Image (tube, rainbow, N blue to C red):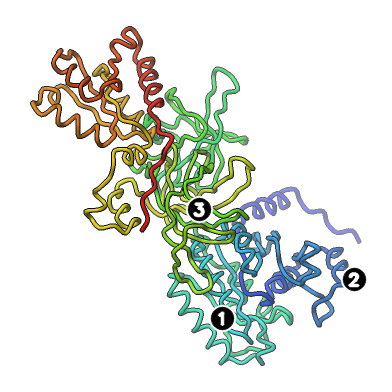
Amino acid sequence: MLAAPVSTDRFEQFLQQDMEKDLLRFTTAGSVDDGKSTLIGRLLHDAKAVYEDQLASVKKSRINRSSGPIDFSLLTDGLRAEREQGITIDVAYRHFATARRKFIIADTPGHEQYTRNMATGASTASLAVVLVDATKGLLPQTRRHSYIASLLGIPNVLVAINKMDLAGYQQEVFVRLQKDFLALADQLEIKAVQCVPVSALAGDNVVDRSENMPWYSGPTLLEHLEAVPIQPASSIAAVRVPVQYVIRPDAAFRGFAGQVSGGTIRSGDAVMALPSRQSTRVQSIVTFDGELDAAVLSQSVTLKLEDEIDISRGDMLVSPDAPPTVSSHFSAMVVWMNELPLQLDRTYLLKHTTRQVKAAVTCIHYRVDVNTLSQESTQELPMNGIASVELETSSPLFFDSYALNRLTGSFILVDPLSNATVGGGMIQKDLSRHLVEAAVNVTGASDAEAQEVTWQERIGRNGHRPAILLIPDPIAGAAERALFEGGFQTIVLRENELRSTALASLLSSLWSAAFVVLVAFTEVSTEIRRTLEAVAGDSFVDFADVAPNLERNDSLEQILSHAESLRSTHRFVPRRG
């Protein structure tokens, strides 16, 4: 008898429900031979997420490291070297789904020499499954992987206390190891922790509840994965849309494509473009499937704006009343991924959201021993090393701290010669307002010694030579903003300051601090002009003489062009004791 055909409506309803399932990305972590790959293989097998031909291939495999009929680790260890050595080397990604949720698993290596691989696989995870061998307890690798999970801001940790079958399924073993890990989690400030006693080999408490541990009443591993709240990558409500591409199919449409990296953006919302700080409103939100009333976090859309303002790739559309930090000097935690160690003051390419700038690490505060969590002094960072550093960029970035927004608070470093990704970073805080404190802390010098800064060092710190530029008053504000966004130390002096009897002293102080001084004028007396020339010499430029008949935008372009010629090729590096 033929089965009744499934109605089109029911089939479409099923597809719609499947599409609306939320997605949990999680990673595995643990010591060597804790059974990570076996656990994931068992999870896929018992959740009916393994194809029959793949399962048949594993059963026929001549490599079987398990005492049972199936070596579940072979379902995830895909590389030949992994199969031969019995270890996980590369990150293996696996997809599966249940009736309640979709999953992406990043099965990451446990060896210390593959720390960079683990950091890569865990960077987008919302949960980390940390394995603990019930017969060995917490090992140094457990501390290392837990620290990396906390460093990467993974909000949930599921502790799978594995090999309970070898520990005789004893409740005392589970309670002791649970207490030990909770103490570690408290030290690392990991707040959401769930411990589950499992046997990956026997299948206890992985998908099906174990009959061997009736004393455990908590969720199985899969039940927790299906129920754990998925926290967004950003905890801020302010809008962040880095511009990936400008779309102009014809003269009637100009849109800015990008992924929403913070907040929710709606048609009619006010937005501000960085770095220009020009404001406008969202006219419409366009996608391939049509227009939307609103776009949420991680959604890729094209925004059409009400006004024609200058925006290009690398710029960012943000909430005008809650903009991100704009700075070219900040601290960050960096995971180094290259065989050549990190070199201080070497120029790297820094890719942050859709923006790419030149950057240099000017100071390594400390290196973290990931096994003991101690902080060590160092002047270089080898492959797989993790350190707290200071960076300076050639032009400002628009960022939030990584703790608030994993999307706008992270970056990668690229070698400009080989184009290899050499490091990944998580921004901690802006340092542009704390230069004096940073200098004292880094050098270890006394307050008196820290004040002994030479003129050349100020030029190196600012990244440019000083100058005095005489410019028309109507464009002074726009010129100062443009120079400031370009990384220049600048200030505007207007007519009331010019009339001061202490003008020469004021100019000398600004000159000694390597400022680009913009003198805004309507009319300038001969006496004041002589004072400007006396302080700056050849670095005094009167733009009334250089470009007397230029329009506003052309005058700004001339000023910016001249300022670029002041760039210093030397970057000041704080002295170290």
Residue pictured at 20% horizontal, 26% vertical: 493
The relative height of residue 222 versus residue 272 in the rendered view (above or below) is below
Whether pointer 2 and pointer 1 mark residues with C-beta atoms closer than 8 Å, the reply is no
The picture places residue 411, in percent across and down from the top left corner, at: 51, 48
Residue neighbourhood size for the residue with mark 2, other residues' Cα within 10 Å, grouped as few (<14), some (14–19), many (≥20): few
User: Viewed as shown, does residue 558 lie left or right of 495?
Assistant: right
Q: On the image, numbered disc 2 is attached to which residue?
A: 60
Task: Decide which of 146, 18 is in the foreground and name it.
Answer: 146
Which label's residue is closer to the chain start, 2 or 1? 2
Which label's residue is closer to the chain start, 1 or 3? 1
**Image quarter in which the C terminus is found:** bottom left
Q: What element carries label 2?
A: helix
The picture places residue 104, in percent across and down from the top left corner, at: 65, 59
Report the amino acid beneath label 2.
Lys
Residue neighbourhood size for the residue with mark 1, other residues' Cα within 10 Å, grouped as few (<14), some (14–19), many (≥20): many
Report the amino acid beneath label 3.
Gly
Residue pictured at 32% horizontal, 24% vertical: 479
Q: How far apart are marks 1 and 3 (CA)?
A: 28 Å
Q: For residue 351, say whether it is visible.
A: no
Residue neighbourhood size for the residue with mark 3, other residues' Cα within 10 Å, grouped as few (<14), some (14–19), many (≥20): many
**Image quarter in which the N terminus is found:** bottom right
Report the amino acid beneath label 1.
Leu
Task: Decide which of 465, 24 is in the foreground and name it.
Answer: 465
The picture places residue 253, in percent across and down from the top left corner, at: 54, 23
Which of pointers 2 and 3 indicates the residue nearer the eye?
3
Which label's residue is closer to the chain start, 2 or 3? 2
User: Viewed as shown, does residue 472 lie left or right of 412?
Assistant: left
Dot label at residue 138 = 1
Q: Distance between the residues labelled 2 and 1?
A: 35 Å
Q: On the image, numbered disc 3 is attached to which residue?
A: 425
Q: Distance between the residues labelled 2 and 3?
A: 43 Å
